[in-house]
Image (cartoon, rainbow, N blue to C red):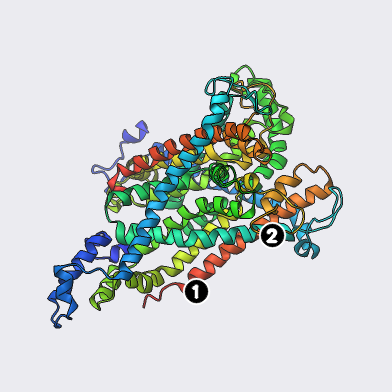
Amino acid sequence: MSTNLADPQRLATPPTFQSVSVNRRIKNGIATALVWGAFLIAIIPLVWVLYTVIQRGFPVILDGDWWQKSMSGLLARQQGGGAYHAIYGTLVQGLVCAVISVPIGIMVAIYLVEYGGRSRLSKATTFMVDILTGVPSIVAALFVYTVWITTFGLSRSALAVSLALVLLMVPVIVRTTEEMLKIVPDELREASYALGIPKWKTIAKIVIPTALSGILTGIMLALARVMGETAPVLVLAAYAPFINYNLFDGPMASLPLMMVNERNNPTAAGFDRIWGAAITLVVLITLFNLLATVISRALAPKTK
Amino acid sequence: MNDPVAALRPAGSGDTGAERGAAAAPTASEAPIPPTPEAPVTTKAPHVRPGDRIFRGLATGSGVFIVVLIGAIGLFLILQAIPSLGLDNVNFLTSREWNTTDPTNLRFGILDLTLVTVVVAVVALLIAMPIALGIALFLTQYAPRNLARPFAYVIDLLAAVPSIVFGLWGLFVLGPVLFPFSEWLIANLGWIPIFAKGNVNVQLGGTIFTAGIVVAVMILPIITAVSREVFERTPTMHVEGAIALGATKWEVVRTTVLPFGKAGYVSASMLGLGRALGETIAVAIILSTATSSFGWSLFDGGSTFASKIALAAPEFNDARSAGAYIAAGLVLFVLTFVVNAIARSIVAGHKEYE
């Protein structure tokens, strides 16, 4: 480089745009490579996990019985049977959880955006929603255990699982709904007030419908998240290899619980059941994610 | 995604609902249309419609409910942990023992659980932090514009995979793959305590090392998502200023994006730490239970708070034994509460992130 500077043929006035020094170019190149590398590294486990699940589970779910039968009456080493009972459990626990969480979550978001302002309660609520987002699922499960089972003396049931899932679902719904309500233009609210429409009706008929697609997307994503939760079902529900429609009593299977349960089964049948349940769960979650995308596309407010 | 809409809003649209409502009333009375009979009444003595009162009550009640809920979680865990803590025959904080099979002679301490929990979380964080930083920079600064969104979606997919699937993958697939590497580390770097031969069979892969890697993968999406959101808010003026001074891409990032987003990145990492501390089922599946206590090696087994509770939960039958696990759950709750609160307070101190 120093020879460059001493070059006798060098121009008397330096060019307007000087070339970037080698040192800086190397640093830039390294940084670019590292940043791309970080992204590619993160893709590896994703592809690897999905490949494992598909490769090991796909043959299992191709069997029609998998979707129509339970594990009732089968021995640990016996092939066959299905996950119908566990799919029912996962869906029903998720839906009951959604039925409880959605109104609470949306009302909290409405409070934060429309009523709370900068009051102390509003700040406390925002903070607590943040904290609730970070509450580990096992702690949520233990909390429901202490209330439901030891304090009220009720038995382990699917409903208890749903209640624990509510704790995990509400903060997600609050966050997404809050974001959606915030981007509803104020002009819409003001136009409604100007027509003499009460605030609650403005919220219910103008604000919520405008934000609806985003809210529903958030609900679907939250639902997909809680369906894969294992800790609450482990603490609050016992596994049943047969179908149990009763939400309030008795053991009920769910896909995560089925996987945990079959993990102790060293036979080939157990292997099939674990990965069959895993791919079924991934497929269900993917479906709910896709549904979220479809809803957000179909219901998105017309901007023009 | 929210920015374009936010930009369209008039200045001062950040006003709160209450202020907005107050502003609407005078506007109505100034309108050229003759005011309706109720209008003057509304301005003088505020008459609240029953629908409004009910709706407001419901919304406020829900807000209160959330605050009460967190209090209730703490309260119930404390109330149910106290009796068992009283029956504990060893020191709860400093004992490494955990034996709750005999409710009349409870011996449980959380030292081992705390160490394993913290070490798993720290290993996960050390792996995830640089990678998440790279991904966040990649998605906001380096990726081609039209591909940034799909790429971000791919990273979010990692969060959609259930933790139990990650756990099974870690145990059955990643563990065996890591075995030769672990063996090599133990053989060649075994004199460093953290690479020493641990208290479980390395061949089974149920070590803190495997668990740490899997948890790192699981906390990548949250750290990435939060950092990305902050990096995206780097003022365009700063970036353009750096470019105008002839900075290379990396110099732009180093002089504008990183200083602006540092606090957000630290906060994101704290959130990731909170997740890692509470990660339950993946760790429960992967970690082999050890008979001897934790010896500071990455190739040790053991239990974290969450995995200990999860594995014992189906057999909760005696309130006194269950109380021991509830006490452990309480410690975990306090731990994650503190970590999350710190994470939020870091961001709260930076108004430019709003």
Question: Would residue B162 appear left or right of B337 to someone viewing this image?
Answer: right
Residue B73 visible to the viewer: yes
**Secondary element at image label 1:** helix
- Picture coordinates of residue B265, whole percent (x, y): 40, 41
Residue A55 visible to the viewer: no
Chain containing mark 1: A
Q: Looking at the image, which is closer to me, A5 or A299?
A: A299
**Secondary element at image label 2:** helix
Report whether mark 2 lies on the same chain as mark 1.
Answer: yes
- Picture coordinates of residue B286, whole percent (x, y): 67, 37
Q: Which mark is residue B338?
A: none
**Crowding at mark 1 (Cα within 10 Å: few <14, some 14-19, many 20+):** few
Q: Report the residue that reaches farthest toward the bottom.
A: B33
- Picture coordinates of residue A128, whole percent (x, y): 40, 47
- Give the answer, above or below, for where B35 lies relative to B11: below
- Picture coordinates of residue B251, whole percent (x, y): 36, 42
**Residue, disc 1:** A298
**Residue, disc 2:** A87
Amino acid type for the residue under numbered disc 1: Ala
